[in-house]
């Protein structure tokens, strides 16, 4: 495994659309293993392949119990609503309030090629949406209400 560098906002690659995975090969497994290590070191809860410069539809989501490996993920249902503060490893020191569904179900392939369905609420639901947006070149800052310094102080108190 190896750490990969996380691209930062302003890098044009982050705005590109990622391509579906057609076959699971050693390169893909290495990518996923490297992404796991990179996510672990970063202290974040999710990572999309495009953030390490690979335009493939692969994301990781740490749901607090395990790191889900999602290949070609799609959202199959959304329920409810939440308004919470969000950040992104590609946008260091930027925080903003986003509108997201409260419960999200995602269907994806795992590294063994099996189709799986995962349901998450709260932070995990936000993370599913946030990471899947990355696959279409969307960053949370595109639709978040960005917090200024005073607002940041308030929420950290
Ligand atoms: Ni992000």
Image (cartoon, rainbow, N blue to C red):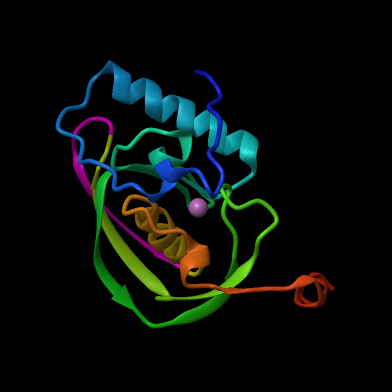
Q: Residue at x 15, y 33 (%)?
A: 22
Q: Taking 18 as reference, is 66 left or right?
A: right
Q: Taking 85 as reference, is 114 left or right?
A: left
Q: Quadrant of residue 97?
A: bottom right
Using the image as rendered, state which of residue 139 and residue 10 is in the foreground.
Answer: 10
Q: Position of residue 87 (x, y in %)?
A: 60, 60
Q: Position of residue 50 (x, y in %)?
A: 40, 40
Q: Taking 58 as reference, is 81 left or right?
A: right
Q: Residue at x 84, y 73 (%)?
A: 157
Q: Position of residue 84 (x, y in %)?
A: 57, 75
Reply above or below: 89 against 120.
Answer: above
Q: Position of residue 47 (x, y in %)?
A: 47, 44
Q: Taking 141 as reference, is 41 left or right?
A: right
* Span shown in magenta: 111-121
Residue 48 appears in the rendering:
no
Reply above or below: 9 against 110.
Answer: below
- Magenta region's main secondary structure? strand
Residue 113 forms part of the magenta stretch: yes
Q: Residue at x 50, y 18 (%)?
A: 1
Residue 157 forms part of the magenta stretch: no
């Amino acid at each position: 495994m190896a750490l990969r560098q996380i691209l930062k906002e302003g890098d044009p690659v982050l705005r590109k659309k990622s391509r579906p995975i057609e076959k699971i090969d050693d390169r893909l497994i290495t990518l996923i293993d490297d992404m796991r290590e990179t996510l672990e070191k970063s202290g974040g809860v999710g990572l999309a392949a495009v953030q390490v410069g690979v335009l493939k539809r692969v994301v990781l989501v740490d749901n607090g119990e395990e790191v889900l490996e999602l290949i070609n993920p799609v959202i199959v249902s959304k329920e409810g609503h939440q308004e919470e503060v969000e950040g992104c490893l590609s946008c260091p020191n930027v925080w903003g309030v986003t509108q997201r569904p409260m419960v999200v179900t995602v269907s994806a392939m795992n590294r063994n090629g099996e189709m799986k369905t995962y349901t998450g609420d709260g932070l995990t639901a936000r993370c599913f949406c946030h990471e899947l947006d990355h696959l279409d070149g969307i960053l949370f800052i595109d639709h978040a209400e960005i917090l200024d310094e005073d607002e940041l102080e308030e929420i950290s108190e």
